[in-house]
Amino acid sequence: MSSGPEQGELFCAAPQLGPGAMLLSGFVLPYADELLDQVQAVVGVAPWRQMQTPGGRQMGVAMSNCGAVGWISDRHGYRYAATDPRSGQPWPAMPVIFSDLARRAAAQAGFADFEPDCCLLNRYRPGTRLSLHRDQDERDFTAPIVSVSLGIAATFLLGGQQRRDPVLRIPLRHGDVVVWGGPARLRYHGILPLKPDTHPRLGSQRFNLTFRKAL
Ligand code: MD6
Ligand code: FE
């Protein structure tokens, strides 16, 4: 065997999500426990919190960040910040296994040399949803986004370039990765309210790790 896939890259390739978007089913499954250990380490330093929207509502999804910058939301808007507003301290460094897997997933999807500088951590419970939005707070849209799902299942909504465009429903399970970039980079997307479910390690929670090049 000269050039077989590494362990962890033995996944089933995706249904068609359209150009620039790819579902890598089970891509991080062999590393899930290690990823969860590192999530615990990150939120030990930068705890989960439900941020305020610019309109003054509290988001249902609880968030944290690691890396050089973190995505934040408050009454002043959405933006990236080098420090955690809670503590005034820099966000925890991005664990090496996070950036490694993000880079490998991006490469697998056809985006070479992805260097994320931000990992946004999202925590969902049954009933939590994320309404349709575009990821447009980053400085350049040439880098893809890599999104890792852990814990209970969710349904990902993937729309088009306009809010009114039809949306695909994509089931996401523990260990799945979605990569999108290029022509898909600014597509609308969201998460349907999670159904009651339990995961052996995470209980009734879903964690999502979203890797981006923000700067
Ligand atoms: C989530 N994900 O899966 C929310 N954004 O919990 C996102 O908002 C997202 O999965 C951009 C690219 C991939 C994503
Ligand atoms: Fe998003």
Image (cartoon, helix red, strand yellow):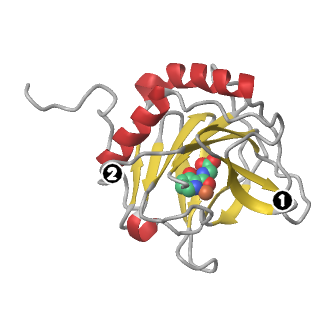
Element on which disc 1 rests: loop
For residue 156, side relative to residue 82 (left or right): left
> Residue 118: which quarter of the image?
top right
Inspect the image, locate mark 2, and give the three-letter code of the amino acid beneath it. Ala
**Where residue 46 sits in the image (x, y, percent)?**
74, 31
Q: Residue furthest right?
A: 56
* Quarter that holds the N terminus: top left
Element on which disc 2 rests: loop
**Which residue sits at x=72%, y=43%?**
195
Numbered badge on residue 72: none
Judging depth in this view, the residue of 89 and 145 nearest the camera is 89
Residue at the spot of label 1: 53
Q: Residue furthest left?
A: 2
**Where residue 109 sits in the image (x, y, percent)?**
33, 51
For residue 80, side relative to residue 23 (left or right): right
For residue 151, side relative to residue 111 (left or right): right
> Residue 207: which quarter of the image?
top right
**Which residue sits at x=76%, y=46%?**
61
Above-or-below relation of 61 to 100: below
Judging depth in this view, the residue of 68 and 126 nearest the camera is 68
**Where residue 39 sits in the image (x, y, percent)?**
62, 27
Residue at the spot of label 2: 109
Q: Residues within 10 Å of mark 2 (few under 14, many from 20)?
A: many
Mark sitting earlier along the chain (1/2): 1
